[in-house]
Amino acid sequence: MFKNEKFNIAIFLILIALQLLGVAAIWTRFQLIYLPIIAAIYLWMGLGTTLYLHRYLTHRGFEMPGWLKFFFATGSAIGLAGDPVTWVGDHRFHHLKSDTKRTFIVRDTDFPTPT
Ligand SMILES: [Zn+2]
C-alpha cells in the first residue's frame, strides 16, 4: 500500500500504551475541565496531519506563514505521524496507486464514486 510500509513496533507499543492510559483515566480524578484541553490537543494533532502533512506539504494546496507551519508541524509530531519527508513520500506513492482514470466525481452530489 505505501512505499515505505514498515511495521514500527515502537510506535505500535506507544499507541497501545496511550490507549491503555486513556482507559485508566476512568479510575483517576478526571475533571470536566480537562475536556477542552484534550479536545484542543486532539484537534492540533489532527490538523497537523490532515492540514499540514496532507493538504499543505503533499498536495501544495495553499500557502501559510512560517509560524503556522511550525505550529502544525509540532502538532503532527505530537500525533506520532512520523517525519514529514517519509509521510509525504508515502502519501504521494499512495495517490499514484489509488487515483486512476476510472476514479471520477459525480457532479450532482460531489460524492466520489469509483466505476
Ligand atoms: Zn492526498
Image: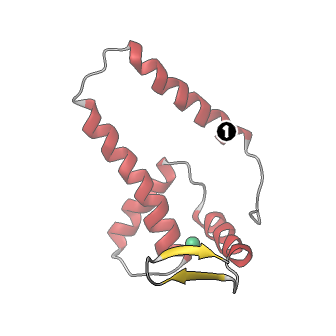
Farthest residue toward the left? 33
Q: Quadrant of the N terminus?
A: bottom right
Q: Is mark 1 within 8 Å of ligand 1?
A: no
Which residue: 49% across, 60% down?
49
Farthest residue toward the front? 108
State the residue in front, 74 or 5. Answer: 5
In the image: residue 61, left or right of residue 105 = left
In the image: residue 48, left or right of residue 11 = left
Residue 68 lies, with reference to residue 63, above or below; the image says: above
Residue 53 lies, with reference to residue 58, above or below; the image says: above
Tag 1: residue type? Phe
Residue 51 lies, with reference to residue 77, above or below; the image says: below
Which residue: 64% across, 69% down?
91
Quadrant housing residue 95? bottom right
In the image: residue 36, left or right of residue 24 = left
**Residue 22's x, y, as percent?**
46, 27
Which residue: 54% across, 74% down?
112
Q: Residues within 10 Å of mark 1 (few under 14, many from 20)?
A: few
- Please say which color scheme the image uses: secondary structure
Residue 32 lies, with reference to residue 109, above or below; the image says: above
**Residue 23's x, y, as percent?**
48, 22
- Under tag 1, what secondary structure? helix
Ligand 1 is found in which quarter of the picture? Answer: bottom right
Label tally: 1
**Residue 12's x, y, as percent?**
67, 38
Q: Residue at label 1?
A: 12
**Residue 115's x, y, as percent?**
68, 78
State the residue in front, 26 or 113. Answer: 113
In the image: residue 47, left or right of residue 19 = left
Which residue: 60% across, 55% down?
82
